[in-house]
Amino acid sequence: MPGTLRVVVDRSRCTGIGICESVQPLRYEVGDDGTLAVLDDVVPEEDRATAEEAIFGCPASALSLIREGD
Amino acid sequence: MLLHAKHHDVTVDLDISSLDFWSRPFETRDETFARLRAKAPVSWHPPIEDREIPPEVHGQAGFWAVTRAEDITYVSQHHEIFSSELGTTMLHPGLPGRTEPASFLDMDPPKHAAYRKIMSATFTPKAVAKLAGKIEERATAIVARVIGAGTIDFVEEVSAKLPMLTIADLVGVPESHIETFAAAGNDLVLLNDPSTAAGEARSERANRAMGTIAAIALELAATRRAAPEDDIMTALVSAEVDGVRLNDMDIIMVMALLSVAGNDTTKQTTTRTVLQLARNPAQRDWLMEDYEGRITASVEEFVRHASPVIQFARTATQDVELGGQQILAGDRVGVFYCSGNRDERVHADAHRFDLTRPRTPNVGFGGGGIHYCLGNGVAKAQLRALFREILTKLPRMEVGEPDYLVSDFINGVKHLPVTIG
């Protein structure tokens, strides 16, 4: 069984611009101070395409997808 | 470090520096950029030609042109190698010692981060969503005003209005000063266009525009210090960077930056999109079949195709190899978003205006990294609201021939005659 897919934020790269939140508003939230909160990091298979759109759309290349157990 | 003064041999016999080149239409210019992308993705060029300031006066040796999307992103994401603060982000040469840094656009971390934090609350997706109602209200009024207006200049009567009102709402500029504030920002952008007078008249025009912005900024700052509101000016007068309050000049420069960044970009994208939708009625029909479902992805194509900002400059902080060229510390590097958004490696049939494109990231809001357009969400909200109104309320608008701005910085349309029955 493959492990769970999760979104990971590279805090050294994230600028809080919020493209991810505009694609997946239930998963991401940029706070007033520009800090990104990941409300749910687990990516079910059926959500993968949208999750990847948010990840590839990040202009700071701060998001990635990892499979737990890798 | 010696800035922008080291000479290199020209690496390719293609001109992107002359005023003649920048006076040609976008599509013609991209024939040259396409050749650069294909055979010389990073190349050395003489400085951009200024109408009045010769190279022996401005003293700049030239610049490296970065033309492929991938390299534009690399440069943009490596601010520690490609600085915005060293020597500013204006590729167009100015008089030595007279180029004021454009606030946080021309800063590196940590100062850049401190400034951006002051304004981040205004631009979060949640804040933009809250602003959307106001934007829609403004868009409805702007379009209602021109129904049945006959022949008008679309740029002045429609494109220019919403960005101007929106940035004024965000900053807190009162209605009475909005027109003056926007006109001053427009004047700053027009400075290199041949329609603008030369010599003393040009510098007077620049000084007058900055003077106008300064007066509005300082009056508003005083008002907000006395009575805070929920806007950018209140954030600016309350903010501290390294424990120090922003001074008058800091605040004026933020206002000048916002007046250009917040006005001209969305304005140009609006005008260019109206042109494209008129020339591609099948695209317009496709969008109108499901406006709410298709507009978000379509706006990405509006911005890619319009590419309102042509380029920004960086300065190398160290020797670095890019695209097979050896860039030296202190060299000027121009990142050409206009070229990245036509890069055939990323966008198939790149000149085609195609709303059904797969959502591939473009460089219309910049190449990424810390200077990616802070107002991108606000711009998209404006375009969604405005085109909903334009396409439903002005379905039979006749679009005439555009009068293009001559500029190596803003991909502009000065006037666009339209007839609205």
Image (spheres, coloured by chain):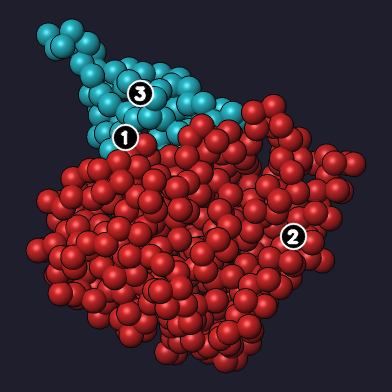
Chain colours: A cyan, B red
Does B204 appear above or below B4?
A: below
Distance (Cα) linking label 3 and label 1: 8 Å
Say what amino acid the circle numbered 3 marks. Asp
B61 vs B29, nearest the viewer: B61
Say what amino acid the circle numbered 1 marks. Ser
Distance (Cα) linking label 1 and label 2: 37 Å
Instruction: Tell which subunit mark 1 falls on.
Output: A
Residue at position x 22%, y 11% from top? A68
Residue position for label 3:
A10
Residue position for label 2:
B214
Does A11 appear above or below B295?
A: above
**Do the residues bearing badges 1 and 2 touch, measured as CB atoms within 8 Å?**
no
Residue at position x 32%, y 53% from top? B331
Across and down, in percent, residue B23 comes to: 36, 84
Instruction: Tell which subunit mark 3 falls on.
Output: A
Instruction: Tell which subunit mark 2 falls on.
Output: B
- Residue B258 in the figure: left or right of residue A54: right
B97 vs B67, nearest the viewer: B97
Q: Quadrant of residue B346?
A: bottom left
Same-subunit check for callouts 1 and 2: no
Mark 1: few/some/many CA within 10 Å (<14, 14-19, 20+): some
Total marks in image: 3
Say what amino acid the circle numbered 2 marks. Ala
Across and down, in percent, residue B319 comes to: 25, 43
Residue at position x 30%, y 62% from top? B63
- Residue B385 in the figure: left or right of residue B233: left
Position of the C terminus of chain B, as image quadrant, is bottom right
Distance (Cα) linking label 3 and label 2: 39 Å
Q: What numbered label is drawn on residue A61?
A: 1
